[in-house]
Amino acid sequence: MDNKAKALVWKASELIRGARDSRDTIYIVTALIATRVAAERAGLFIDKNFCDVEELAAYLSKSLPDLAEALLDATDALRRDKISGLNEMLGYAQIILQTGIDHTELGWLLHDFHMEASGKAGSTLLQRGLAELAVEWTSQGGECGTAFCPYSGSFSFAYAYAAKGIQSVYTTDVLVESAWAKMMSVFCEQRIEVRQASPIHDHLDALKIKERYAQGASFPFWGMKLDSSDLPASSEIVAPHQPASSEALLTQALTYGVEGRSAVVVPPGFLSRTVTGDRSFKEELVRTGKLAAIVQFAGFTLNIASVPPVMLLVDKDGLHTPLMVDASADRFYTKDRYKNHFFGKEALLQAIETEEQSIAKHITIAEAEANEWNLDVPRYVLSDEAQQLQDKLELLPTCALSDVVEFLRCQAIKAEDEGKVYLEANQTDIDGIGFFKRPKKQISISDTKVMTRVKRQRMIPGDVLVTVKGNVGRVGLVPDSAEENWIAGQSFIILRLKPDGPIQDSTYLYRYLNSPMAQQALVSKAVGTGIKTIKMNDLEELPVVIPTLAQVDKASEKQQQMVSLQEQIAQLQQQIDALRHDDWLKL
């Protein structure tokens, strides 16, 4: 039945003409189906033709004034001169309702159409499963009072609450989103109260200091720069941890207004960020026991970004040690081209409830503090293979990487039109057996101050370079053939053996850092929403297995075998090239 309704909605959207794109079409389709549903409930018969949206709104204004206003707001915000096909669409709306589809399910169907039509440039909507997961968790064990869903990206939560029979309050600063939300509320018995909020800096001020909610869920604005001087005075009450990122400030506002449980979707970068407000807010959540869990989902589950979203589960009535949950496993998703569709709500809720060891781990306040309040889930929850490597590492004699090497940070070097020529190495200059080839990139430097910095980045034979930005963990060894004008690019940190350190063989260090054991440790320390980075203190504390003399000799022997095999491959390739061209030279 739902598939039939879905096909009919697609067909109905083809009747709308004059809309700029599919997203605008869905706005109109939603409005007209909502009009038909609301009219039937009110006993209002729509049995006439309408010239335009304005005439339809005028007809509805007496019996359904709120819906008429929302209809006008939506079409006005779309700025269309003429939308046609209304009467045909209203007729199709009646056919859709005759399929017997539940109104709430019809709303979810339109929600999903809207999400697909919006894409990355459109409205922020969440997959139904993610929204229902948050609603299920926040509404467990408490009174089903009003739910708070502030900010434009939170509509999916508001609808999920309403679909569960819980009244919700949704705020947005976008007129067309406000109008669409009012029309969507028709499908869930008008359980969504839509409030028009003012622009971003006034969101905090719009909150009523004395207003409280039983639960809430939100998808706040990500990565927006908020100047503290522009924030209202009330922000110091509802969001005391300043300055901070937009997601941290707005999450504070949500948790301030909610008495019980709340769920917030944040970028993974928030977990590792050390900005004053972000860090102190995370510390407060952990120390006070309010942070019940952090759930990290797979990438490509959002319509607006490919980064893996993170859901903070906050419980002001509880006293928790945070449960770190890695919900990126394939068993929670179905694949559709480049998208991950989350369907594992029940399985994940059970895993959280039972604290399933394969994907979840509690952390203590001491652990969080030792990691400087970096709450990145992969730092604490390891895969089975990674855990086996970690267990093995704990049985071996180790020391910190900072005991073995000196660290030379590399910076971006701005090239000049003329001067001394240097060859700047990047990751593509590492060959198949780990040695750096002659770098291809040439830069000229004449400024004496820049020259001093360049000399600090010179690659000396025996240096080991590790990438700490971008494709983190890539390791390369500087060969004896390195020339004096080779320098390391900004994505590297140069590791240079200490004269009195416990390891004196750079080949062993290179091979160890390239091993699965060290690679797992490096990758687990990577942080960042877009471009991954490894922080300096994490690199310094990386455990390194202290070798015996026999292990050092064996590492050197294996590396030499790789060099010999590489030389044989090069010779064989030369023979192949010669055979390919030999006969043609005799024609």
Image: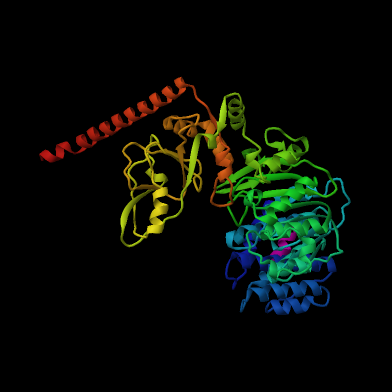
Q: On the rendered structure, is 60 left or right of 525?
A: right
Residue most extreme to the left? 587
Q: Position of residue 53 (x, y in %)?
A: 69, 76
The one nearer the camera, 223 or 457, is 457
Image quadrant occupied by the C terminus: top left
Residue 112 in view, yes or no: yes
Camera sees residue 36: no
- The correct choice, above or below, for 58 with respect to 563 in the image is below
Above-or-below relation of 108 to 586? below
Residue 30 in the magenta stretch? The answer is no
Q: Is residue 147 left or right of residue 492?
A: right
Instruction: Give the camera-side residue of 169 and 47.
Output: 169
Residue ranking furthest to the top = 550
Extreme front residue here? 500
Left or right, residue 325 beside residue 568: right
Q: Locate residue 267 relative to residue 462 in the image: left or right.
A: right
Residue 72 in the image, given as x and y percentages of width and height? 71, 75
Magenta region, residue range: 90-98
Give coordinates of residue 290: x percent, y percent: 79, 47
The residue sitting at 62% across, 78% down in the picture is: 82
Magenta-colored segment: predominant secondary structure: helix
* Image coordinates for residue 285, horizontal then vertical, percent: 76, 49
Give the residue furthest to the right.
143
Q: Quadrant of residue 244?
A: bottom right
As displayed, is residue 145 above or below residue 536?
below
